[in-house]
């Protein structure tokens, strides 16, 4: 886990506010925003995989291919449904 993920949400906001007051802060803010977007995309792929698993129409390998998630992640999600 990276150091940023360990920071509390209110601390993250304070850091972002301080960074945007400086020129270099904009690049860091953009990187953090991209990190958040990627996390959201990952959660969306996991939700899709769960829905496909519930439908019981595709194999784990097919779901992994459709969602671009590792097969181990699909197996973990399948175990959660049991």
Image: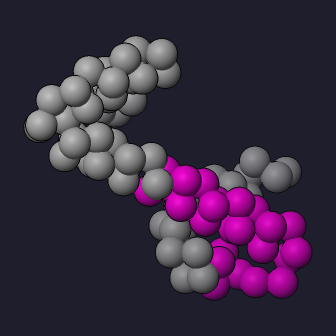
What is the number of callouts on the image? 0
Residue 37: image location, x then y, percent: 46, 54
In the shown orientation, is residue 49 left or right of residue 55? Answer: left
Q: Is residue 15 above or below residue 69?
A: above
Dividing the picture into quarters, in which one does residue 78 lie?
A: bottom right
- Colouring scheme, one of rainbow, by chain, secondary structure, one colour: one colour
Tell me if residue 55 is in the magenta stretch: yes
Residue 3: image location, x then y, percent: 28, 26
Whether residue 64 is visible to the viewer of this picture, yes or no, is no
Work out which residue is located at the far left of the displayed protein and give it: 24
Work out which residue is located at the far right of the displayed protein and give it: 55
Chief secondary structure of the magenta portion: helix
> In front: 72, or 29?
29
Tell me if residue 47 is in the magenta stretch: yes
In the shown orientation, is residue 5 left or right of residue 78? Answer: left
Residue 11: image location, x then y, percent: 40, 15
Whether residue 20 is visible to the viewer of this picture, yes or no, is yes
Give the magenta range. 38-64
Residue at (55%, 53%) from the top-left corner? Answer: 40
Quadrant where the N terminus lies?
A: top left
In the shown orientation, is residue 82 left or right of residue 1? Answer: right
Q: Is residue 13 above or below residue 38?
A: above
Residue at (29%, 41%) from the top-left corner? Answer: 29
Residue at (37%, 17%) from the top-left corner? Answer: 14
Residue at (60%, 82%) from the top-left corner? Answer: 66
């Amino acid at each position: 886990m990276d150091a940023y993920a360990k920071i509390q949400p209110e601390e993250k906001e304070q850091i972002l506010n301080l960074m945007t007051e400086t020129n270099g802060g904009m690049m860091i803010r953009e990187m953090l925003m991209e990190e958040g977007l990627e996390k959201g995309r990952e959660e969306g792929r996991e939700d899709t995989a769960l829905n496909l698993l519930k439908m019981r129409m595709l194999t784990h390998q097919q779901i992994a291919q459709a969602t671009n998630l590792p097969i181990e992640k699909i197996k973990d999600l399948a175990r959660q449904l049991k």
